[in-house]
Amino acid sequence: MALPWQQLLRPTLDQLWATIPVPVFDLAEHYGIRVHRRFLPDRIAAILHHLDNRWFLYLNATHSRERQRFTVAHELAHVISYRNGHSLSTPDLCMTDREHYTDSRAAEILMPSWKVRWFISENLSLDEMAKEFAVSRHAMRIRIDEFMRKEVKRCGNKLASGKAV
């Protein structure tokens, strides 16, 4: 039986979550991904290559630090999904759904829920949170929106069941 991706990531991420921003390049290395910066066309964020049971990530050297971090987290999520039995080449989801799913996992890697919750409780602004997590404003906005949707759903389910929130 395949494990949820969070369980595959948890041992390392639990140790690293105390460090914000999350050291995503160290995580990639831990999972056997060798990251190389290369000059690629601007429309290409990275190329992930699997050869002889090794992973190589060629990262666009011209992209911003924030975009590179998100790209590494995105590709790391692909590798974890692959190791959990999901193919990278044959769609178990359509391409758009798979990429959206992987973007969501990348956001969770870079911006852990517990830390998003804490930053919100401390009234940090969007810009302050983006700076702390070393992500773009755009990525931070999407993560907050997804986080709030999940929180509303979680609280709504507890209220519906009569449990305290």
Image: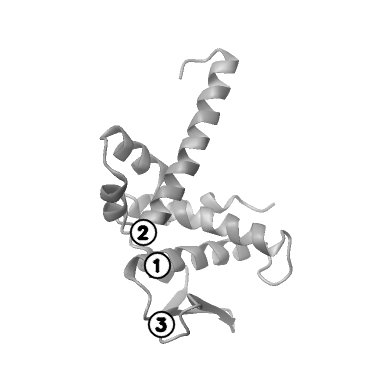
Residue type at mark 2 is Ser
First of labels 1, 2 by sequence position: 1
The image shows residue 72 at horizontal and vertical percentages of 44, 68
- When the figure is inspected, residue 155 is found, relative to residue 25, above or below; the finding is above
Q: Which residue is mark 2?
A: 136
Please give the name of the residue rendered at 39% of the width and 70% of the height, measured from the top-left corner: 68
Which image quadrant is residue 114 in? Answer: top left
Q: Which mark is residue 36?
A: 3
First of labels 2, 3 by sequence position: 3
Specify few, some or many for label 2: CA neighbours under 10 Å numbering under 14, 14-19, or 20 or more. some
Quadrant location, the C terminus: top left
Please give the name of the residue rendered at 73% of the width and 60% of the height, measured from the top-left corner: 92
Residue closer to the observer: 67 or 21? 67
Please give the name of the residue rendered at 62% of the width and 65% of the height, measured from the top-left corner: 82
Q: Which residue is mark 1?
A: 67
Please identify the residue farthest to the bottom as the structure is shown. Answer: 39
